[in-house]
Every structure is written in C-alpha cells, then in structure tokens.
Image (tube, helix red, strand yellow):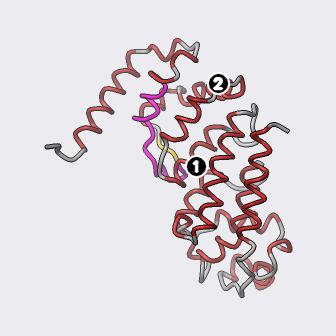
Amino acid sequence: MSRAQRQLTTALDALDRTFASEEPFPVEGCTYCYGEGGIAELSKPLHLIAEDMVSSVASEVPSHWDDFPRLYRRLAPRIIRSVVTGRLHADENLIATRLLEAGWSTWDAPLAGALRDVWSAWWEASLHTHPSPVSVRDTLSLITVATGSLRPWLDMWNATRTPAADAHLTDFIDDVLVEFQIVDLHMGFYDEYHAAPELLDWLLTDVRDRLDDARLDDPYLFEALQNATRSTHSASPDRA
C-alpha cells in the first residue's frame, strides 16, 4: 500500500471514530418509498444498516425525511467510505449536493474537519493511483462542489508529478475535450459549479507542458479563455 493510500485509510478510519458520537435515533420519513421496515432499519446502529439502504439514502431527496441533516450526518461515514472506494450504487456527483443540503460545513468542527481531511487524502490518493476506483473527473467534481473551490485541487494536481497523475491528466483531457465541452464545463449533478474559466486557464498554462495533445493548441480554446477572463473581470466589483 502506498503512502497516499495509507493516509486515505487513516482519514477514513478517523472519520468513523469522529462520527461515532452520532447515535441512532428514531428516523421518520417516507414509508411509501421505504416501508416501515426500511424506516426501522435506518433507526438501528450504523453497522446494522444494509449497504443498499445506505446507497439509497445517500442520493435521496431531503424531503423524504423529517430530519434529513441528522440522518445524513449519521450515515456520512458509510456514505463517504462507499464513495471513495467506488462501491456506492449512486451517482457520485449527487453526493456533494446532498452534503451541501445537509449543511456539512456547519456541522460541529470535529465532524467537518474529519470530512475535510478525507477530501484532501482522497484527492492525493487518486493522483497517486491509476486507474482509481472513481474517475478523476467525478472525484474532482465531488470535492469541488462540496467545498465550493476548484483551484486548491488543481494546485495539488499541478504539484504532483507522478506517472499516475499524468495518466489521469491524459484521461481528463480526453474526456473534457469531447465536442470541446471544456469551454462551458460545469461540475456537480445540477451543474452547481462553473469550472470552465479556471480549468481552461490551468490546462493552457500550468500543465500544458505535461500534455502531448495538439487539440490544446486549437485557437478556439484560447478564444474561449479570453472570453471567460473578460466575463469574470466584468462581473467583478469595480476597483478603486
């Protein structure tokens, strides 16, 4: 096991320990979708809840539950471990949305801090492992939407000069250059984060020397970057 993988395992184990303070409670929700048996199962200790049930709740709309934030907080260690290991039977991009709806960043400091540690460890482990359990695009999308910030993760990628990171970079380019979707690329299940301006700038400047792909020299991409830059500046408050 690599150092990065050990760090991820440590972060996930710490997540389990930190969230152990979230005790079972009588869950109330949509019995039409989950039945009395399903609702009763969700009220049990965490280790007694089936994997399929965890996946179902992970992507379910908040209105199905009387206390969605509390339920999602209690299930968070199981949900996150399943996502990170590629075992969640749900769209990874939707998990960031549900975490935001559950207000994860406002949870008690130890809980939110443990999740932040997982984001960093997961991203680093992904950049050191190719192929990874979850595609690099989906991983980047989830942590970007969840944290509301893209640049720190791009900076980590830029600083990681490993064969795995370069292979992921090639995969990522092949993905986002299909029909030049990079020029208006959004991240998240509901396109919550407009990533195109930052990604274009990063790909055409910071990591261009690592990519042997002539498509990145297409004038259309540079024009799109200029337009995105002008749009960003025009949207900024007037400076004195």
Q: Residues within 10 Å of mark 2 (few under 14, many from 20)?
A: few
Residue visible at 68% across and 46% down in the picture: 121
Identify the element where label 2 is drawn: loop
> Looking at the picture, does residue 86 appear above or below residue 165?
below
Judge from the rendering whether residue 76 lies leftward or rightward of residue 201; answer left or right: right
**Dots 2 and 1: beta carbons under 8 Å?**
no
Q: Pick the residue in front: 224 or 153.
A: 153
Return the x and y of residue 103 as percentages of the image width and height: 53, 68
Residue 161 drawn at (x, y percent): 64, 24
Q: State the image quarter where residue 138 is shown.
A: top right
Residue placed furthest toward the bottom: 26
**Residue 232 in magenta?**
no
In the image, 8 versus 133, the foreground residue is 8
Q: Is residue 9 left or right of residue 67?
A: right
For the residue pair 100 and 129, the one nearer the viewer reads as: 129
* Above/below status of 85 relative to 158: below
Real-space CA distance between mark 2 and mark 1, rounded to the nearest whole angstrom = 21 Å
Can you say whether 201 is above or below 61 in the image? Answer: above
Q: Which residue is mark 2?
A: 161
Closer to the chain start, of discs 2 and 1, is: 1
Percent coordinates x, y for residue 126 in the rendering? 70, 38
Query: Magenta region: which residues?
Result: 188-203
Amino acid residing under circle 2: Arg
- Mark 2 vs mark 1: give the one in front: 2
- The residue shown at (68%, 39%) is 135
Quarter holding the N terminus? Answer: top right
Tag on residue 143?
1
Number of numbered discs on residues:
2
Query: Residue 129, position in %: x, y?
Result: 75, 34
- Disc 1 marks which amino acid? Ile
